Image (spheres, grey):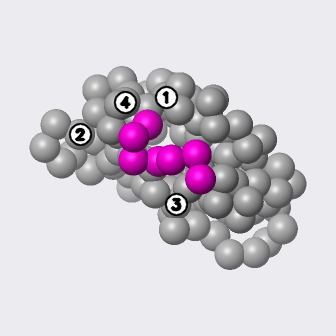
Amino acid sequence: MNPTAPSQHVIDCLQTILDSTASKNYELFTTVGDAGYKAAITQEMFEDVSEQLGSRLQNGYSITYFGDLKQGDSMIYLWKLSFADGGDEFVAQMTMNGDKVAGIFIA
């Protein structure tokens, strides 16, 4: 059974995160987050991740939606992140608190 796709807003938030990581644009990266997200993910942390993933994202990727989890007042959305280079894939876990991103974890 395929999970129901998340709302367009949730997809747009993830796309903004991936686009900003590819282009190494911290200011854009923070536009989708709540205050806790902005405080927890420093520019230095963002730059480290962008350095690791930026070129792979620029060279092409696809996302496959796995599903979501409800935890307290938050929703957690899970995707598989695959790259055009055929290398290692990652799981992207994005936590939403209302209409803002409360956290992003790519592992």
Q: Which of marks 4 and 2 is nearer the N terminus?
A: 4
Give the residue number, with chain letter if any, for mark 4: 34
Residue at 64%, 60% (x, y): give it: 48
Foreground mark, 4 or 2? 4
- Image check: 21 left or right of 2? right
Measured as percent of width and height from the top left, residue 87 is found at 75, 75
Foreground: 99 or 25? 25
Give the residue number, with chain letter if any, for mark 1: 32
Residue type at mark 4: give it.
Answer: Asp
Foreground: 23 or 42? 42
Foreground mark, 3 or 4? 4
Give the residue number, with chain letter if any, for mark 3: 106
Q: Which of marks 3 and 1 is nearer the N terminus?
A: 1
- Image check: 7 left or right of 96? right
Foreground mark, 2 or 1? 1
Foreground: 65 or 76? 76
How busy is the neighbourhood of tag 1: few (under 14 within 10 Å), some, or many (20 plus)?
many
Q: Earlier in the sequence, mark 2 or mark 1?
A: 1
In this view, 73 is above or below 58 = above
Q: Distance between the residues labelled 4 and 1?
A: 7 Å
Indicate the secondary structure of the residue bearing disc 2: strand
Residue at 37%, 30% (x, y): give it: 34
